[in-house]
Image (cartoon, grey):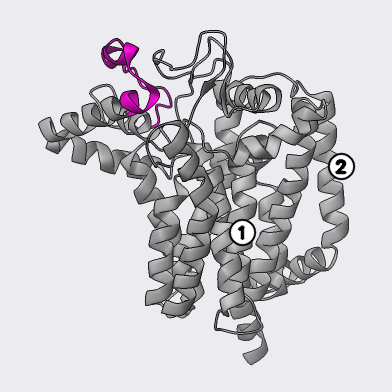
Amino acid sequence: MGYAQITFQIARLSKTVWNSRIVILCLAFVVLATVNLVGPFDKIVFADEGDYIAIAKTLITDGVYGYPPGQACPPCAPARSSSPASESTPTAFRTPGYVFFIAPELALGLQKRGINFLQIILWATNAYLAGRIALNLRGPVAAGAALVFALAFPVAAYAALALFPQTLTTTLLLLILLLLFTKQTNSVSSQRAATLGSLSGLAILVSPALLTILAGGALVLWSLRILSIRSLLVASILACLILSPWIARNWIVMGRPLMATSGGWVLLAGNSKNAAPGNSVTDVSDYRSDPENLSEIERDDFFRTAAIDWIKANPVQAIVLYFRKLFQFFNFREQYGTEGVGGVWVQAALLLSYYPLLILMVMNLFIMQSWTLSRHEIFLFLLYLGAAAAYAIFITRIRYRIPFDYIVIILAAIAIDKLTSARSNDRLTR
């Protein structure tokens, strides 16, 4: 079988996959749901999982968005609290989006395994959304390829089996992209812009790092003439309206209008003498004793100031570290802070699933000169690079990258479509 015949068969298979998407998605859900049932996915493995559950249960039992008595955010030194020792402590360390997502299930008596089932539904939905976006941008061949790539991407499946906000973040990000990349019209109506803004606000409440990334993405959309100034303003206003209750709550309860009190910590974790690319747990013990008697906001300020002071005192080292973290964003392995996580087989799975997609994406951009890029493809490239640049300011972790890896999946699927289309055209002209 010649190369042209292989690409022709790939194109036909991709179309068949997309036409059978409902059956495939149902089977994928059954497989991952079965893994959730028989595997050890009822255990709280990561510190972040326990953190989210603690805040959600405190919200349910005490009506306070905070930690139960005697508990504080895991990576921080104990903070001074205005509440008595027997009362829960309000916090703004975690934004409320994911907590509000898991709180109803916990209130109904569901545990981690039950929440995982909902996340598995979102995981399957994300595969469908990736396919729909590829369909709108290119056609059914790209849609089928995107569906297969998304379902075969192991790190996304694993994230759906842990209490991490990345699966929900991915759903919101893909909904934003789907609204941007519709077939009906090239312009974005005010109503659609309002929906985009609302989804953006919700996504930021789930993952606050998206604030900078989506703001930069909005400017790129305007520069590429995908969004008009009017649509941009409408979307920005709706996003601010979604975010304003949380910011107002922090002003009233915490004493300052802010998004989260975790910014100083993650900045210090990524910019201090022991910071290193790929290290998910940075030793900042030298700084822990000083803010012991500070409030949560004062402690956040202390960590941020310490990070900025280190950058000012070590500018060359900070710049080199930034670019090392930038390259780490595209890595397939990292040093985990949880024992027993990230073995050789996990690294092999990440290597074999991520880099082929990344290579296809790069081929689309740099190698095949005859392939033309649409404005939407250019935007997706810039959004992915922008996410890398933004996370490199703080810390880069593989699971933080998951929502944006769906961009790689979509662009790789488009590359498959372009490759098969080019070979089919060559075959027809012979």
Q: What residue type is labelled 2?
A: Val
Q: Quarter of the image holding residue 409?
A: bottom right
Q: Position of residue 217 (x, y in %)?
A: 42, 63
Mark 1: give few (<14), some (14-19) or many (20+) Cα within 10 Å: many
Magenta segment: 276-300
Is residue 45 toward the left or the right of residue 313 in the image?
right
Mark 2: give few (<14), some (14-19) or many (20+) Cα within 10 Å: few
Residue 174 badge: 1
Which of 229/181 is in front?
Answer: 229
Which of 286/256 is in front?
Answer: 256
Helix, strand or loop status at disc 1: helix
Residue at (50, 11) in percent of width and height? 84
Residue at (49, 23) in percent of width and height? 336
Residue reaching furthest bottom? 429
Residue under pointer 2: 30
The answer to if 279 sits in the magenta stretch is yes
Can residue 404 be seen in this snapshot?
A: no
Q: Where is residue 150 in the image (x, y as percent from the top left)?
A: 67, 52
Helix, strand or loop status at disc 2: helix
- Look at the numbered discs 1 and 2 and tell me whether their residues touch, using CB distance below 8 Å: no
Identify the image quadrant of the N terminus: bottom right
Q: Quarter of the image holding residue 319?
A: top left
Work out whether 61 lies above or below 207: above
